[in-house]
DNA sequence: CTGTTAGCGCGTTCAT
DNA sequence: ATGAACGCGCTAACAG
């Protein structure tokens, strides 16, 4: 089942078989047909390793995650993964994933992946503001696309949602509902998406003339537990926030729980907006207002962009900023003090 | 930085360099030393693809997950992953992971991985009782180890915890605490681990002379939400269970929530035992009794076994059954009816 | 249009 | 102890 055997069985040379199979135009239609038929009959497929040695391409890419911050199979991480994989398959590419251990071994592990030359390119997820992984990939000049931006110097291809615009819009919506004390429960500051969301938040505060001192920003894990914890603290204050803007739906669900524990009503006494448009948020009581990021599309775009880079049709500075859409639901309502 | 360049710079032949580097004995100590020094100085490392074409080995394996049932980075999935990766690294092997989409594309996607010959072997996680993935791997004769057993015919290497023994022991513990109505909230029946846990449970019921009709078995998702839902139903019954044995700690935490909602006290009115010895369970109120599975060690064993199979030092029928340990904590106590 | 030739980078006999 | 030569399986530049 090598190309040799195939050529012998047809009585023609190896190179003719190779060209027929690889779609070269300088081979007669009749020969091409014979080759295709024989290949199918003998169930031939080129040895991928030999193919790689000759071409330099593996037909595979790696999606790189970092351990403590993302679920590959649930929620948005899973959707991103699905989007990337789908689009790749349409290009006859294959996606493996690598979960980097946090801490010291993170970059060395990524280096081992590159050293192995098992993949033609990389999709790096969950970028940080200064991301050593981006630095490495950039230095090694391997084709890569990040999902999320950095704020460092390396120019690189990325796909990202307009986090800033989304939180600008969400904050403005809360302001126009009469809220003056809005708390931002954000992700850790070194995550780029968190940084952008905060910028949008602060811009809206300035535009609306709100006091930054009355609109606290907290940085926390992206979990319901963290959201509940932080919100419980804030709700105990004399001057409690009338609205919470949260970096994820998970945080927002935790906030909602804290509001209930404080004997207050979500959407009336306290408004809550999340991010991600998760199923859990949609089915919450009341339904959770959220930002829909279209992450499946982003995954597909990241994959398509990587394909173009690998084929030399796009450069390392290609960038795609996807708009995100605010979905108002019953968890966010007018500020009660307006009525008094 | 090819072996050619290295040989030229030393003024010796390629083959001598190759043998020196690969530890052949028929090369002089002096030459070997020169080669090693030069290799280090020029930062030489063999091109992995060429190396693979010559040897047939990639130095990488794939850990295969299935999408909707496991988190690669949280909880036990993460620990297993860590164990496998650690042990592999000690063997100079590298682990990538593949998340199979559920449904129709599951097996074809696995086939694509095999066709790509990107890896020397596979660790398959979360086996099912009749697992088409195992069937495929067995047919293709690629080195593989499963974490978890199957009950079908293909003989294959596996590492598993003694699920049956663990639940036998846990059920006996509940019985000796006086419980007569014990509910099992199990995982889906097609998961092998769930099947074994149920066998242990039923064996203990028989030995203890409990009525199977008073000890219901429910099959559900491995989530807190599911646990809460099922437990809420059971607790509403006139003859409610006095103890719940749960397939995961997540389920158990959900059950505990349902118990509280029913105005009952966990560990007094109702006992709960989970599985996995999760951090969340340890910090719950009261602390959750659970089964500790030593999953890190299992991951390491699976990796070690796979290495031996790849090297031909173990056969496809090597099997490792790890004991699991019951950890009694305050969530499980004596049955209240005993005192009356 | 097709066959011959030359690599891709390395491991491994077979002589010397 | 060392070098020359061959093969792994395939692609691609060069002839014809």
Image (tube, coloured by chain):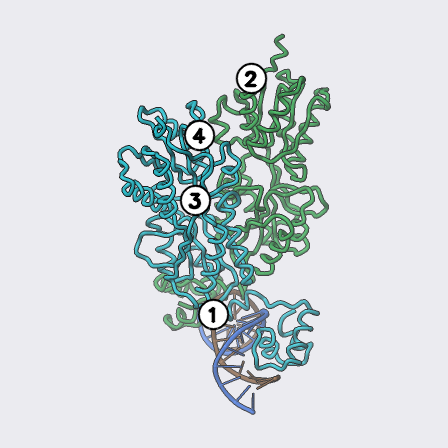
Chain colours: A cyan, B green, C brown, D blue
Residue A338 placement (x, y as % from top left): 35, 30
**Image coords of residue A264 (percent x, y):** 42, 25
| Label 3, label 1: how far apart the Cα atoms are | 65 Å
Judging by the rendered image, the residue that carries numbered circle 1 is B15
Q: Are marks 2 and 4 on the same chain?
A: no
Q: CA distance from mark 4 to mark 3?
A: 18 Å
* Coordinates of residue B3 in the picture (x, y in percent): 43, 68
Q: Is residue A290 visible?
A: yes
Q: Is residue B95 visible?
A: no
**Foreground of the two, A45 or B308:** A45
Nearer to us: label 3 or label 1: 3
**Rendered location of residue B218, percent (x, y):** 66, 30
- Residue A266 is marked as 4
Q: Which residue is mark 3?
A: A326
User: Above or below — where is A64 with respect to B68?
Assistant: below
Rendering quarter of residue B198: top right
Q: Which residue is mark 2?
A: B264
């Amino acid at each position: 089942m090598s190309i040799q055997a195939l050529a012998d069985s047809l009585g023609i040379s190896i190179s003719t078989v190779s060209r027929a199979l690889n779609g070269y135009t300088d081979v007669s239609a009749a020969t091409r047909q014979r080759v295709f038929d024989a290949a199918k009959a003998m169930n031939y497929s080129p040895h991928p390793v030999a193919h790689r040695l000759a071409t330099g391409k593996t037909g595979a890419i790696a999606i790189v995650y970092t351990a403590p911050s993302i679920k590959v199979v649930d929620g948005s991480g899973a959707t991103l993964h699905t989007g990337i994989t789908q689009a790749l398959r349409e290009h006859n590419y294959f996606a493996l994933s690598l979960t980097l251990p946090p801490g010291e071994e993170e970059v060395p592990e990524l280096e081992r992946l590159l050293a192995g030359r098992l993949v033609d390119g990389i999709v790096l997820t969950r970028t940080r503001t200064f991301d050593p992984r981006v630095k490495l990939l950039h230095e090694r000049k391997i084709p890569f696309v990040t999902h999320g931006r950095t704020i460092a110097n390396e120019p690189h291809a990325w796909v990202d949602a307009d986090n800033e615009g989304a939180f600008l819009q969400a904050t403005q919506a809360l302001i126009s509902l009469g809220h003056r004390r809005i708390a931002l429960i954000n992700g850790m500051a070194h995550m780029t998406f968190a940084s952008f969301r905060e910028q949008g938040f602060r811009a809206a505060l300035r535009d609306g003339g709100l006091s930054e001192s009355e609109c606290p920003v907290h940085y926390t894990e992206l979990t319901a537990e963290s959201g509940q914890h932080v919100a419980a603290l804030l709700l105990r204050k004399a001057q409690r926030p009338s609205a919470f803007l949260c970096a994820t739906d998970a945080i927002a669900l935790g906030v909602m729980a804290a509001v209930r524990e404080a004997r207050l009503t979500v959407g009336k006494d306290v408004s809550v907006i999340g991010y991600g448009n998760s199923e859990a948020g949609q089915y919450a009581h009341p339904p959770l207002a959220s930002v829909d990021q279209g992450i499946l599309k982003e995954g597909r775009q990241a994959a398509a962009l990587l394909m173009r880079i690998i084929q030399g049709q796009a450069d390392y500075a290609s960038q795609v900023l996807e708009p995100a859409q605010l979905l108002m639901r019953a968890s966010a309502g007018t500020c009660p003090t307006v009525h008094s």
